[in-house]
Image (cartoon, rainbow, N blue to C red):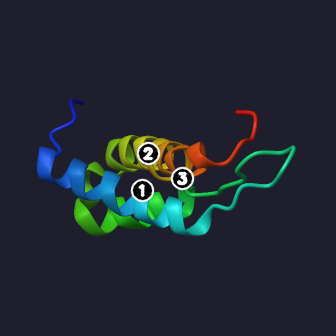
Amino acid sequence: MACFTSPVELLLAEITNAIIASTASRPIPGIGIPMLIAPTAALIATILDPQQRAPLAYIGGTLGVMIGADLIRLMNASGEHRPV
């Protein structure tokens, strides 16, 4: 079965998950950024496209966390002198 999710739905899922991940994640020294986004990614995917919720949750959740919790936090921490 092919994924027929529209690019607009994918972008909405990624942006929404990135916003949630960036607001909910906090860096812990020595550990990193603990984050559990799977339930919210599944909920967002079910709201956007119930027929294609599995691929939409996977794509949106994965890219959303990488963008929101990793890249945005990395850009904010670039002024701080911490090892990455």
Disc 2: CA contacts within 10 A as few (<14), some (14-19) or many (>=20): many
Does residue 84 appear anywhere in the picture?
yes
Quarter that holds the N terminus: top left
| Nearest to the observer: residue 56 or residue 28 | 28
Between circles 1 and 3, the one closer to the viewer is: 3
Q: Residue at x 24, y 64 (%)?
A: 48
Residue 21 in the image, given as x and y percentages of width and height: 52, 60
In the displayed image of the protein, which residue is found farthest to the right?
30
Residue marked by disc 1: 18
Residue 15 in the image, given as x and y percentages of width and height: 31, 57
Calculate the distance from the C-alpha at mark 1 to the C-alpha at mark 3. 15 Å
| Nearest to the observer: residue 64 or residue 1 | 64
Q: Residue at x 75, y 45 (%)?
A: 32
What number is the disc on residue 76? 3
Between circles 2 and 3, the one closer to the viewer is: 3
Give the quadrant of residue 16.
bottom left
Query: Disc 1 marks which amino acid?
Result: Ala
Calculate the distance from the C-alpha at mark 2 to the C-alpha at mark 1. 6 Å
Q: What element carries label 2?
A: helix
Instruction: Verify CB contact (< 8 Å) between mark 2 and mark 1.
Output: yes
Quarter that holds the C terminus: top right
Q: What element carries label 3?
A: helix
